[in-house]
Image (cartoon, rainbow, N blue to C red):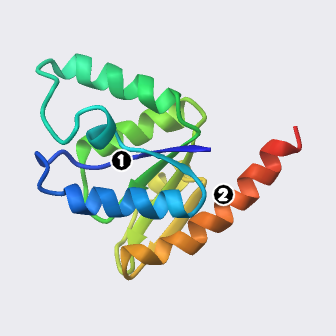
Amino acid sequence: MKVFITASFKGGKNKKEIEKLCSIVKNAGFEDFCFIRDVENYQKVFNNPKELMNRAREEILRCDVLLYDATKKSTGRAIELGIAFSNNKKAIVIVKKGTVIKDTLRGVAAAIITYSQIEDIQQDLKRLFIEWTKIENRF
């Protein structure tokens, strides 16, 4: 199962965060994909916002799951979550303990994982990977 990992574009300033999250996803058993890392290589490569979002949609459609950290608000990542939901993709919402999220976000999530440290999500991701691959293999 391939996971589209949402991340905010910060011109490479959040590269360590992104790499860590991708590593956690991969160590849980999923195939990791992050648009900022794998398409943009941490640089601005799209000058046309419509081209950017069309390409993001194409990549989301190639994935099975979308991972969205709801701790900090972000328009772009929320749009990616909407694209995934509207195309019947599973969405994993992760959120730092103490963060309040709306019911609408809960309504699009296949799973919600809370964490104190980002590494805390790996066990829950591993459990989801096992559960979801068992379901997939039944059909």
Q: CA distance from mark 2 to mark 1?
A: 18 Å
Which quadrant would the N terminus be assigned to in this image? top right
Residue 127 location (% of width, % of height): 67, 67
Q: Above or below — where is 107 with respect to 127? A: above
Q: Above or below — where is 123 with respect to 93? A: below
User: Could you tell me which secondary element the residue under label 1 belongs to?
Assistant: loop
Q: Nearer the viewer, residue 72 or 44?
A: 44
Which quadrant would the C terminus be assigned to in this image? top right
Q: Counting residues from the N terminus, which is met first, the one under dot 2 or under dot 1?
A: 1
> Which residue corresponds to the image point at 75% horizontal and 59% vertical from the top-left?
131
Residue 139 in the figure: left or right of residue 118 = right
Residue 113 location (% of width, % of height): 51, 69
Instruction: Inspect the image, locate mark 1, and give the three-letter code of the amino acid beneath it.
Output: Thr
Can you identify the residue that label 1 sits on?
6
Residue 3 location (% of width, % of height): 51, 46
> Which residue corresponds to the image point at 58% horizontal and 74% vertical from the top-left?
123
Question: In the image, which disc is placed on residue 129?
Answer: 2
> Which residue corresponds to the image point at 36% horizontal and 71% vertical from the top-left?
100
Q: Above or below — where is 55 with respect to 132? A: above
The quadrant holding residue 16 is: bottom left
User: Could you tell me which secondary element the residue under label 2 belongs to?
Assistant: helix
Residue 79 location (% of width, % of height): 34, 37
Instruction: Inspect the image, locate mark 2, and give the three-letter code of the amino acid beneath it.
Output: Phe
Q: Nearer the viewer, residue 44 or 8?
A: 44
